[in-house]
Amino acid sequence: MMKVYDDDSPEALSRILALTMVVDGHVAPAEVRAMYQAPFLARVGVDADTFDATMRELCEDLLLSADNRNGSFIEIGPEQVEAMLAEIGAGDLRMNLLRTMIDIVYADGHVDERETILVQSAARAWFGRPLPLAEALAAAEG
């Protein structure tokens, strides 16, 4: 069972960002830098300590509650992803978070299919339909 955070809390936001980084199986330094360049994070209380603690909790939760553990990969079920995304309710947070997710996905110069699925899942959950990454980026910038 995944931890439940208060809606729109710094921990809920941090967990989505952390998931965006780990969903492809590794965290690239460029992804971390991209996240910390997001101007809205300080305003909503996401600092290095909060992010680090939430990343650790996410990894622990994934190890304990993953739908499938196949070698070195952990499969995250759609219900788990939907539950995490549902903790973000405010429209401005959703838009800023989607933009930051896209920045993270593009930061390492390679967009993995799992990253695409996560961004599309967020767009579907938050805005009613999945978007291709280019369209999601345009929506986030608009």
Image (tube, rainbow, N blue to C red):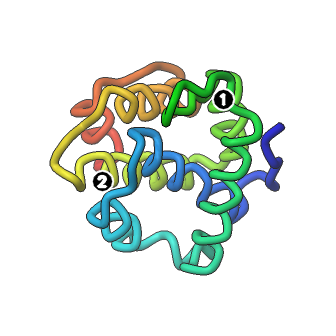
Q: x, y percentage for residue 96? A: 45, 55
Identity, as a three-letter code, of the amino acid under mark 1 = Glu
Q: Position of residue 60 (x, y in %)?
A: 70, 52
Relative vertical location of residue 20 with respect to residue 136 in this rendering, above or below: below
Residue at position x 36%, y 24% from top? 131
| Mark toward the start of the polypeptide (1 vs 2) | 1
Give whichever of 14, 74 is nearer the camera. Answer: 74
Q: Amino acid at mark 2?
A: Asp
Going by the image, does 140 lie left or right of 67? left
Q: What residue is shown at x 63% (from left), y 76% (from top)? A: 45
Q: Measuring from the top left, give residue 74's x and y in whole percent.
A: 56, 32
Q: Which mark is residue 82?
A: 1
Where residue 67 sits, quadrant-wise, is top right
Q: Is residue 126 left or right of residue 2?
A: left
Residue corresponding to mark 2:
103
Q: CA distance from mark 1 to mark 2?
A: 21 Å
